[in-house]
Amino acid sequence: MPLLIPEQPSFTTESERQVWERLRDELGPDDVLLANLRLTDESKDHEADLVVLMPDVGVVVLEVKGGSVWYDDGWWIKRRGADTRINPVAQARDAKYSLRRYVEGSPRWGSRTRVAWAHGVAAPHASFAAEFAVPELPRWALHDRDDLGSLAARVRRNGADLNHGQRAPSYDDVTAIVDILTGTPTPYDPVAEAEGREATADRLTQEQATLLRVTRLLPRVEVRGGAGSGKTVLALQQAKELTLGRGGRAPQRVALLCYSIGLAEHLKRQVASWRRRERPAFVGTFHEFGSQWGAPDGNREDGHFWETGLPDLMAELAAGLADGHRYDAVIVDEAQDFADSWWRPILGALRDEEEGGVYVYSDENQRIFARFGRPPVELVPLVLDHNLRNTRQIHEVFAPMAPSRMYARGGEGPQVRFIGSDAALDAADDEIDRLLDEGWAPAHLCLLTTGARHPEQIARTESGGQDGYWRSYWDPDQVFYGHVLGCKGLERKVVVLCLNGFGDGERAREKLYVGMSRATDQLVVVGDPALVRAVGGQEVATRLGV
């Protein structure tokens, strides 16, 4: 069979289908049969019913006319009972010249010389005498119903005898013509699809920000929501509105806090893009909140320092703050990371410790640190139950681990992939290479580990410190390598989650939940299937196809 483009054309008339099927069955394997080829140039729209490309012969453009066609001082056809003048030869000839000009004008044709182009007319339902002849079309270029039995051979003669002395195309010439006439191929762009979903998610999140209107008369609120519910976006928006003093309120001095260095850097970058009068007075980590008053640095591995020493010292420093350095409201994102002891200095930094604003954003299922603190004040709970950020496919995989039912509104995406491997880290690295080859930019990709940190994460931390390491998260030329413990509140279009163990296993299920939910558009999980079943449960394993 010849190469068919398209493989299964849609035809408006049965006559076109009949001629196409004859040629399909009779042409050789090096030939090409194009159907319904349309071309628009500066003069008009052209349509070639069929184009036959034959190496060592030529290119033939065929105009197909069904029904009763005859010639009487011109070409005629019967349409709806009326005799109608037509000009199939001019149609075929015009299409031929337009296609030839288009091909020869393409850079992909290069320095090739002209090849043989011909035109013909097929009338599979009409009959013309063997001696029929008109000046504009030789009989051997007119193919009627009596010629269908040898149609391919006739089309070959049509191309050879109407070549006007031009050279026959080679196989490479035919390949080039097909490439030009079928358009410049463009690869599937997964990023474009992801960008569209992101725009929709941004719109939905902004619509959800109307929830903040409810909080204008409530100075102490806890917003609870699972992964993908837009908590961080709402926390940022609330910081802006309180700082500006919208909704009939006076402008407030606001602090926006979190625990994770990476999330703090994200918050700072977002706020830095705002107008100066919209920016809250403080944005950063709990430790940075104390550093502005002179609290010392400490080792993040020193539990006593973080749970007792630092918060006690910060509480003393907060008690001595002048009124101008106190805050009207504090907003805490990922508040489930905060210990009980941390809330004393936070509340102590308020101008009004009894009535000052306290706004908490939390997801109990992302509590992956050994802290179980809650602010010692009464908070009005508000619940976000829509996942706006993750695709439906990603949401459905981690949904069994969520603390409450959420509704997926993040749009459709590719299926979550699971790669079973005993060498999870190597398999995850291979998957990053594959995704880069697929067209994703490095800035779209993240490799997260659940156990030991990736060697690249260790190398970046050793060379640039924590600040340098986290800057690589926003480096457009680098894939980010991280650990689930440090990436809460952050997201990437594509995440390769490497299940390389869970340490002592403490809160392993929450870590798996966090890791899976960091991907907005595409998630690949790599590791031992038994580990998925042990940590996520059979329902998660089933949804992963394990």
Image (spheres, rainbow, N blue to C red):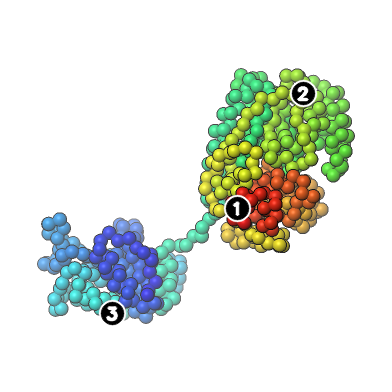
* Spatial CA span between label 3 and label 1: 58 Å
Q: Going from the N terminus, do you reach mark 2 or mark 1 first?
A: 2
Picture disc at residue 184: none
Q: Mark 1 belongs to which amino acid?
A: Thr
Picture disc at residue 153: 3
Q: Residue at x 66, y 19 (%)?
A: 250
- Residue extending furthest front? 538
Q: Are marks 2 and 3 in contact (CB under 8 Å)?
A: no
- Numbered disc 2: secondary structure: loop
Q: Are marks 3 and 1 in contact (CB under 8 Å)?
A: no
Q: Residue at x 85, y 30 (%)?
A: 314
Q: Dot 1 corresponds to which residue?
A: 542
Q: Residues within 10 Å of mark 2 (few under 14, many from 20)?
A: many
Q: Is residue 247 left or right of residue 102?
A: right
Inspect this view and state whether residue 311 appears: yes
* Spatial CA span between label 2 and label 3: 92 Å
Q: Mark 2 belongs to which amino acid?
A: Leu
Indicate the position of residue 63 as horizontal and vertical percent values: 26, 66
* Spatial CA span between label 2 and label 1: 49 Å
Q: Residues within 10 Å of mark 3 (few under 14, many from 20)?
A: some
Splitting the image into 4 quarters, where does residue 434 fall?
A: bottom right
Q: Mark 3 belongs to which amino acid?
A: Ala
Residue nearer the viewer, 167 or 432: 432
Q: Dot 2 corresponds to which residue?
A: 350
Residue nearer the viewer, 34 or 306: 306
Q: Residues within 10 Å of mark 1 (few under 14, many from 20)?
A: few
Indicate the position of residue 408 as horizontal and vertical percent values: 55, 42
Residue nearer the viewer, 291 or 489: 489
Q: Going from the N terminus, do you reach mark 2 or mark 3 first?
A: 3
